[in-house]
Amino acid sequence: MLESWIENRCWSNYSLIKGKIRAVTLVFNGLGGAVVNTYTPLELALADENILTILPYYGPWSWMNRSSRAYVDDLVERVYSFLQLGDDVPLISTGGSMGGCASLLYSRYGKRKVIGCDALYPVTDLLYHFDERHDVAVSMSRAFYGYAEPWEDVLREHSPLYQVEHMLRIPYLIIHGLNDKTVNIYHSDAMAEAMNKHNFQLEYIRDPQLGHGCNIPVRVWQKRIDFVLSLLQKQ
């Protein structure tokens, strides 16, 4: 078992792993994420490969704010220390929607460097997204309450689109549905354009059937699993 300090701060597939841990994969939840008690296909498949998944309870409305980044950094270091994982055990970042935003931002701000990043229908432009849905404006107003900087500067700090030049040069996978009604595909189109402009190693897939948090085709799950496994083959 993981120690209670860790279990009180995340959901993991640790109990399913039977061998030596090959890698740690962060799985960032989307807006409104709650305490978890079921595994996703990604978590199950990676457990079969002895890849530990950690879903940080970094906040359902956090938008990867500064306190959330510190929270995840501390959690990652505690996991590595408790499990006595060496620096040769790689860290990978994944997530969807707000979690896709977090996954991308962790390659910008994370204390321990990730070797790859997977973002499913990510939010990348918070200035645009603030006016996209009322619940988004409500959640961002709470997430960034008390920040001294001008509001637009705060949103840019937490927008992968405006942080591209500072992100790690590692492999990235972005997948977005063509008819996403919750997070407009503009977010991924703009991010892909910016990353390609700076010659990032990016695979960008625009899926015709993918929903947002639902109706996720098997091929999308499999692509994300294959992406994580491909990162380990390059080690």
Image (cartoon, rainbow, N blue to C red):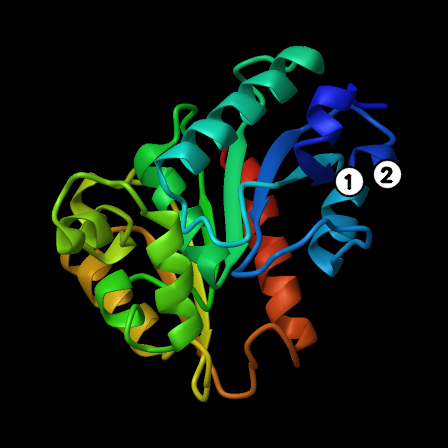
Q: Residue 204 at what x, y percent from top left?
A: 38, 67
Q: Are marks 2 and 1 in contact (CB under 8 Å)?
A: yes
For badge 1, the amino acid type reads Asn
The spot of residue 188 in percent (x, y) is 33, 69
Q: Residue furthest front?
A: 146
- Work out whether residue 75 or residue 41 is closer to the camera in this orientation and state it: 75
Dot 1 corresponds to which residue? 13
Tag 2's secondary structure? helix
Q: Up-down: is 30 above or below 210?
A: above
- Front residue of 89 and 158: 158
Is residue 48 visible to us here?
Answer: yes
Asked where in the image residue 190 lies, by quadrant, the reply is bottom left
173 is higher (above) or lower (below) than 157: below
Q: Give residue 208's position: percent from left, percent from top.
A: 50, 88
Q: Tell me which residue sits at (39%, 76%) in the image.
A: 134
Quarter-wise, where is residue 185 in the image? Answer: bottom left
Q: CA distance from mark 2 to mark 1?
A: 6 Å
Residue for badge 2: 16
93 or 23: nearer the eye? 93
Q: Is residue 203 left or right of residue 214?
A: left
Within 10 Å of disc 2 (Cα), the crowding (few <14, some 14-19, many 20+) is some
Q: Amino acid at mark 2?
A: Leu
- Which picture quadrant has residue 184? bottom left
Q: Which mark is residue 98?
A: none
- Work out whether residue 199 can be spotted: no
Q: Residue at position x 61%, y 17% from top? A: 78
